[in-house]
Amino acid sequence: MTTERPTLGSQSSLREANRGRILDAIKRFGALTQVEIADAAGLSTATVSNIVKELTANGVVTTSPVSRSGRRALQVSLARRLGLVAGVHFASRTLRIELSDLVGTVIAQQHMPLPADHRADTGMDRAALLIADLLESIGASHEELRGVGLGIAAPVDHRDGSLPVHGIQRGWDEVQIAPSMARRLDTPVFVDNDANLAALAERRFGAAQGADVAAYVYVGHGVGAGLVIDGQIFRGAAGTAGEIGHIRVVDSGAICHCGNRGCLETVVNANALVESLRATHGNLSLRDVVNQCLAGDAGCSRVVADAGLFVGVAVAALANVINPRVVVIGGELARCGDLLLDPIRNEAGRAVLRNPASPLRIVQAALGDLAPVRGATALALDSVSLTADITEVSYAN
Amino acid sequence: MPTDHRNPARDASQNPASSAVPSRASNPARDTSQNPAPSATQVVDDSDRAASSTGQVTKPSSPLPPPILSLRGVCKKFGSVRALDHVDFDIRAHEVVAVVGDNAAGKSVLAKTIAGVHPPDSGTIYLDGRPTLIPTPAAAHELGVATVFQDLALCDNLDIVANLFLGREARAYGVMKEAAMEDIARSVFGRIGARLPSVRTKVAALSGGQRQSTAVARALLGSPRIVVLDEPTSSLSVTQTAEVLNLIEHLRDLGYGVMLISHILADVQAVADRLVVMRHGRINGEAPMADVSYEDIIAAITGVPNDLTRATQRRADAARAG
Ligand SMILES: Nc1ncnc2c1ncn2[C@@H]1O[C@H](COP(=O)(O)OP(=O)(O)OP(=O)(O)O)[C@@H](O)[C@H]1O
Ligand SMILES: [Mg+2]
Ligand SMILES: [Zn+2]
C-alpha cells in the first residue's frame, strides 16, 4: 500500500500531516531506514525521501548509512541536541520510559505491564535494561545520557529518593532509589512522587499551563495529589504533601493500609472498585471497568461516578487549603472523562468556599497516562541543567 | 484496494474480535444468552458455577461468562509417564490464564492437547459447553484455537508476509494478490499493536519479540477465539519481553481467551487474570491472580501445601462429591 490517501486540505497541510506521520514512525521505532518509514507511515518512498531531506536541512533528523539485508540504506533518526535524558515512571501496574533530548523533544518511548506489588530490584534492573536498549535503538552512546528522572506511586523523600512512608510500595521500602538506580545507569538519578511529576507536566505542557497554583489529582489504583505553586513542586516538609487519599471520607469506614479509618483510599482503589462489581460482572481489571464505563455499562458507570463523589469531598478540602487556579484530574479513571469529573465537580462544589475571583476549575488531564513520565523527563531536564557536573561526581562512587 | 467479500477468512481476519467473540469483548456479563446452556456434564463437574447456571441461563445472572473451552478429567500418558492426570481446565473470552509449573509438569502437553497435537486418552473437551473432539491441529484451527509453540515454526529466509501466509495460499487465500496480503498483514499487526516497521522484512532480521509477534499474527489469521502461547518470553531481552507482554494485554482487551504458559513469574503476575499451577500432570492450584502471593505460587509449584493448593483441593473434592 504505497499510495497516499487524497485529503481535502491544501498541499502544505498535506505535507504537514505527512511530516507528522514520518516523525511519529521514527519516534515509535527509534531509527528507521527510509523504506521502513515509507512502510510504517503508509507513504511513498519518494514522499519520504523528500520530507526527510527537508527535516535534515532543518536539523530535526539526522541520517547515517547502514546496510539492511545486504543492501545499503539511509537510516533516519531524530537529531538530539546536546545530549539525552530519560524519564521513568513506576506506576502501580505499568513501567513507562521515554528518552528526550535536552530541549525536551521525546525521541523514543517504551512501556510494559508490571506485577501488582512489584519489587525494587527487578523493577530497576528492567528499567535500566530498557533504557540501554532505547539508547541503542536510536544509535546513541551511553555517555549521551545526562540524567534520569524517576517517578513512583508513593510519597518520596526527594533528597535520596527513598520512601518515607512504608507499606505503600511494599517492594520498594528500605531502598534508596536515587543512588541505587544511579549505580545501575552510571548517571545521576532524580526521584519524586509520580503525582508531583504529573502536576509538573500538566503545568508545563498540559491542562494547567499558566496556572500559578495548580493541583493534579490521580484517581486510579489509589488516590493522590501533586501540587505546583509558582511553577515549583510543593512537597511539604518531607514528601507527604498532597496525600489526599488519606483524608477521611467515611466516618466509620474500613481500616486503611495506613492504619487510619475511613480514608478516601479505602473506597477508591483498584481492588475496592472491581470488588464491588464481582457479583454482577465477574473478575474485571481496572482497565475493564474504565472500558465498560465508556461503553455505557450501567454498573461500571455507577462505580466510577460514586468514586467521583468521594474524590470530590477530598478535592474540596484541598481547594479550601490551597485555593488552586485549576485542579487537573488524571489517572486510569480519568479516561472516563465527565462520567468521573461531573460527580467530582458536583461534590466539590458543595463543600468549597466559593471565590468569585477564582471559581474552582476541575478539568481532565491533557497528557493522559503520560503525564507522570513527562514530568519525570522535566525533572531530569531541570536537575541536569541546574546541577551540571557536580552530582555526576557525587553519584559515581 | 480490491476487497473480496466472498472470502470469509479474509473478512474475519480484518476484525477477529468483533466476529469471533462478539459482545463478550465489551461486556462479559451480558451475553450468557448467546451461548448454549452448559451441558449437564459440565454443571455437575463445576460446582462453583452450578447454582447460577442451572437457574436462569438466559439472564445475566452468572458473573462469569461460560468458558469457551473446558477440559474435564483429561488424561494423557506417554508409556508410564502420566503427562496429564485428570486435568480440569477452563479458558474464557477476554481473560489471560497463566499456566505455571516445574519442568515436565505437563504444561506443554496440556497446550498440545488443546491444539490437537496430543488428543486425550480419556476425559472430555467441551467447546461452548458441547463435548468436542480435537483430533488434529487442523481441527483445532477450524474450532478457533490458535497455538504458538515455543519453536515458533517461522521460515527465516522468507519475509513476514510470506511467513504469515505460508501454507495457507492454497486454501482460504487462493488467488490473493501480494498487495492484498500485505494489507492484511499490516492490519493484523496494527490491531495487535505490534511494533514492526516493515512487513517485507526477512524474518531472519527480526528481534525475538518481533518474531513472537509474527508467530502470533500468523496464528490470528484464522480468526481464532483462543490463543495459546507456550513460553513466549523465555530467552527474550527485556525490551522484547515488554513487546510480548503488551501484545498479550492487547489480545485480552480485544476479547481473545489467552493461555500463557511461562516459568517467568514476574511476567505471569504482570498480565494474567487467573493462575493455574501444574505439578506432575495434575492441577495443583488455581486462583484469581489478585488473590495469590509470589510465595503461594512458588509453594504450589514445588508441591508445598498452602492456601492456594488447599482451596483447589476442596473444590475438586466438592465436585467429585456431587
Ligand atoms: N511426545 C512425547 N513423548 C513422550 N513423552 C512426552 C512427550 N511429550 C511430553 N512428554 C513427557 O510428558 C511430561 C510432561 O512434559 P511437558 O513437555 O508437558 O512438560 P512442561 O511442563 O512443558 O515442562 P517444561 O517447563 O520443561 O517445558 C514429561 O515427563 C515429558 O517427558
Ligand atoms: Mg514445556
Ligand atoms: Zn489511609
Image (cartoon, coloured by chain):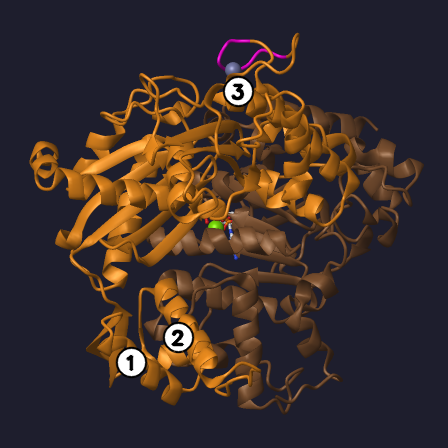
Chain colours: A orange, B brown
Q: Residue A68 placed where, x, y %?
A: 27, 80
Between A358 and A292, the one nearer to me in the picture? A358
Question: Which quadrant is the C terminus of chain A positioned in?
Answer: top left
Question: Mark 3 is on which residue type?
Answer: Asn
Chain of the residue under label 2 = A
Q: CA distance from mark 3 to mark 1?
A: 52 Å
Quadrant location of residue A77?
Answer: bottom left
Between B120 and A236, the one nearer to me in the picture? A236
Q: Residues within 10 Å of mark 3 (few under 14, many from 20)?
A: some
Q: Residue B282 placed where, x, y %?
A: 60, 37
Q: CA distance from mark 3 to mark 2?
A: 46 Å
Chain of the residue under label 1 = A
Residue at numbered disc 1: A54
Residue at numbered disc 3: A320
Q: In this rendering, does residue A299 appear at all?
A: yes
Question: What span is in magenta?
Answer: A254-260
Q: In this rendering, does residue B199 appear at all?
A: no
Question: Mark 2 is on which residue type?
Answer: Arg
Give the foreground label among 3 and 1: 3
Question: Mark 1 is on which residue type?
Answer: Glu
- Dot 3: element: helix
Discs 3 and 1 share one subunit: yes
Residue ID at (31%, 64%): A30
Q: Residues within 10 Å of mark 2 (few under 14, many from 20)?
A: some
Residue at numbered disc 2: A19
Between A279 and A155, the one nearer to me in the picture? A155
Q: Does residue B121 show up magenta in the picture?
A: no
